[in-house]
Image (tube, rainbow, N blue to C red):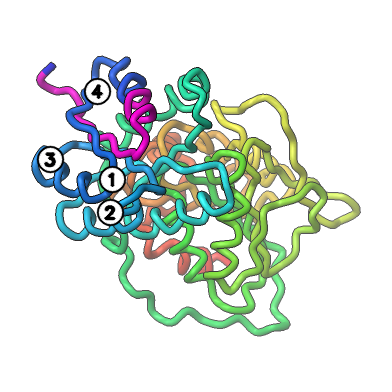
Amino acid sequence: MADQIKVLVVDDSALARKILTGLLESDPEIKVIGTAENGETAIEMNNRLSPDVITLDIEMPVLDGLTALKRIIETNPKPVIMLSAYTQHGAEATFKALELGAVDFVPKPNSKESSWADVIGEQLRTKVKSVYRSKFIMAGEVLPSEKKQRVFEKKAESQKIVGIGTSTGGPTALIHIFQNIPKNFPSSILVVQHMPDGFTKAFSERLNALSNLRVKEAEDMDLITPGCGYVAPGDQHIFVEEIKSQRYVRLSKGEKVSGHRPSIDVLFNSLASTAGKNTIAVIMTGMGKDGAEGICKIKAAGGRTIAQDEDTSVVFGMNRVAIEKGGIHDVVPLSKIPEKIVEYI
C-alpha cells in the first residue's frame, strides 16, 4: 500500500522488536520499515529511512532513549511514541521524554509475549495512526513566554472550580498550564488526563514540582481546597460530591464512559450538577469525543467553557467535537488558556 504509515521500532530487546513489529503490521495501514537496537542506530535510521512515526524504548545500551529523543527532535524531528516501563523510574523518565518532545507513550508489558497483544496491541496501533494524522508539535513550538501573571491576594478565595480534560498530547500541555497558574490561586483544579494506572502519581508529582499549586493524585474523599490540584488516578473515574456545603473528590471503578476510565464526561457531568455556574471547564487536545457532552452540560448550567484551538492541539478531536456541539464559549491557543482561566476566576 502506497499510503501505509512508515514506522521505525527502537528497542534493545530482539523479542520486543519482533513483537512490536507483529502488533503494528497486523494493521494493513502500518508498515515497519526498520528496527534499531539502541539510540545511536535509531538516529542513523531516522535520517536514512525518514519514518512517519518512531516507537522508542527508554532503557537501552550505547545511547538511551531520552538522549536519542533529544537528538532526533533537534536534528530530524518526527512524532515519537515512548515505550515506558511500569515503574516509578519509568514513569518519571516518560514525563521527561514528553517535555523533550515525545508526543505520547504506551506502557510496556512484561516479557511474556501473550501479554503484549492484550495490553498494548490496539492502543499502540491507534496511537500510531492518531499521531501520524495529527499536527506534530515539537516541545516549545507553541508555548511563547507568558507575561507575568497577576498574583492573587492571600486572603482571596473563590467558589469557582476548574475542571480540565485532555488526552493525546495532554501531559505537555498540562505542564504549561500549571506552570502559568499564578501564586495564591483562589480556586481548585481537577484534571482528567487519559493515562494508564501507575503513571498518574508520578505525573502529579511532576506538576506539583512545577506549579504554584499543591498538586496530588486524587484520593477518595479528598476535601477540595483552594490552591490545590487533583489528578484523576489511572483506571478510576473522578467526580465531585457536595456534602454539607463542602465539595469532595470521589473516585469510582465504574464502567468506562465514552470509552474511558477515567472519563472527562464523568468529571464534567458532576461539576455541572454540583458547581454549575461556578464551573470553569477546559477541554484540550485528544482523540475521540470524551468530555464533549459534559462540557455542554456545564455551559447549559451557566459555567464558562474553554477549548484549546486546532493549531496548538496535537490531536484536534475531543475539543473539535465540543466546539461543533456548541458547548464552548472561548476557543484559544494553549498559551492563552491560563490567562483565560484567571480572567474567569
Residue placed most toward the observer, 127 or 108: 108
> What amino acid type is highlighted by mark number 4?
Ile
Disc 2 secondary structure class: helix
Residues under numbered marks 3 and 2 in contact, where contact means CB atoms less than 8 Å apart = no
Magenta part of the protein: which range? 2-20
Which residue does the numbered mark 1 point to in the structure image? 38
Give the residue displayed 57% in from the left and 31% down from the top: 260
What is the quadrant of residue 55 in the picture? top left
Give the residue type that dot 3 points to: Ser
Kindly report the distance in space between the C-alpha atoms of the residues bearing marks 4 and 1: 22 Å
Percent coordinates x, y for residue 333 in the rendering? 35, 58
From this view, report whether residue 40 is shown above or below residue 341: above
Q: In the shown orientation, is residue 280 left or right of residue 123?
A: right
Residue 290: image location, x then y, percent: 51, 34
Q: Quadrant of the N terminus?
A: top left
Q: Quadrant of the C terminus?
A: bottom right
What amino acid is labelled 2 in the image? Ala
Q: In x, y percent, where is residue 135?
A: 25, 44
Q: Which residue is mark 4?
A: 30
Q: Is residue 319 visible?
A: no
Q: Is residue 283 visible?
A: yes
Residue that numbered label 2 is attached to: 68
Q: Secondary structure at mark 1?
A: loop
The label nearer to you, 3 versus 2, is: 2
Q: Secondary structure at mark 4?
A: strand
In the picture, measured across the screen, residue 178 lies left or right of residue 321, that is: right
Q: CA distance from mark 2 to mark 4?
A: 23 Å
Question: Which residue shows up at 36% across the image and 21% down it?
Answer: 23
